[in-house]
Amino acid sequence: MTRREELQEAYEDAMFALLMDYVAESEGKKALEENRALREDPDAEVPQEVRRACLKEINRAFRKKSARSVGRITMKVINKVAIVALVGTLLFSTAFAVSPEFRAGTLNMLIDTFNDGVSFQISSEAVSEQSNLEDIIPSWVPEGYELSEKDNVPGVYWAYYRTEQGDELNIKMLTDGGSVMSDTTGAEIEPIEICGVSAYLIDQTQTEGSKHGIIKLVIVNEQENYILNISSFPASHTDEAPITRDEIIYIAESIYA
């Protein structure tokens, strides 16, 4: 290949990249406009059973190893489009084709997947009614855990518990459009409900390596616009999980008690 041909090929690649960037930006704007319109439609609602089925399907695909390798290639393009377009496609494209009643719902909640992780974000258009730090203090924690720190800054509230062995229990609530990012390497992700509120259990207790023994519970309250993140970490990745699935659920339920 001559120098001229190399330059021509590089020019064509650059033009294609610029075109795709423009298309992504344009489609992202359209998706955001449609998102706003759907959120303002009082008749739009996605049934809970449809939501759970969609999330389980996403989780099933996300856990497939082959999907991870594809994700590493495609996420470069996906990240340039507003993530609401991705969520809208995954959750609602089939539903829209069947009936216009299957709309809105989780459009206030944005879920982004990246390689070996997932992030949750709530729209910042409304302010959470949960505005006191005491709202995130559980009435029950496992024996041995002591409150080591609690504080807040605008939009973020946290309470940290520790054991003498060094195990950690971290509770954090984000309002005002905050987001939670979580590594999901080797994790089992299970959509559940905590006191009627959507939640996602990220279980790495059986994972080998540095993530072994970790378990997290992310509660996403779309009505009150906050995310509550409860995370348990062992003192060492060679230790057994200090908090079980049932215990972290009970901790979460005790916050709402």
Image (cartoon, grey):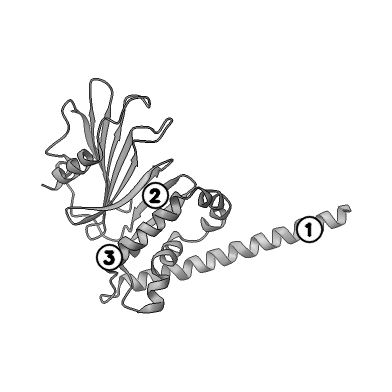
Compare marks 3 and 2 and give the one earlier in the sequence: 3
Task: Determine which residue is flagged by label 1.
Answer: 9
Q: Position of residue 175 (x, y in %)?
A: 27, 50
Q: How many residues crowd mark 2 within 10 Å: few (<14), some (14–19), many (20+)?
A: some
Q: Is residue 39 left or right of residue 164?
A: right
Q: Are marks 3 and 2 in contact (CB under 8 Å)?
A: no
* Residue 251 at least partly seen: yes
3D distance between C-alphas at marks 2 and 1: 37 Å
* Residue 179 at least partly seen: no
Q: Is residue 222 above or below residue 98?
A: above
Q: Which SS class for mark 2?
A: strand
Q: Are marks 1 and 3 in contact (CB under 8 Å)?
A: no
Residue 30 circle label: none
Task: Determine which residue is flagged by label 2.
Answer: 119
The residue depicted at 47 percent of the width and 71 percent of the height is 30
**For the view shown, which residue lies furthest in the right direction?**
2
Compare marks 1 and 3 and give the one earlier in the sequence: 1
The residue depicted at 41 percent of the width and 66 percent of the height is 88
Type of amino acid at the residue the image marks with label 2? Ser
**Nearer to the camera, 219 or 174:** 219
3D distance between C-alphas at marks 3 and 2: 22 Å
Q: Are marks 2 and 1 in contact (CB under 8 Å)?
A: no
The residue depicted at 14 percent of the width and 48 percent of the height is 256
Q: Position of residue 181 (x, y in %)?
A: 39, 45
Residue 49 circle label: 3
**Nearer to the camera, 118 or 186:** 186
Type of amino acid at the residue the image marks with label 3? Glu
Q: Which SS class for mark 1?
A: helix
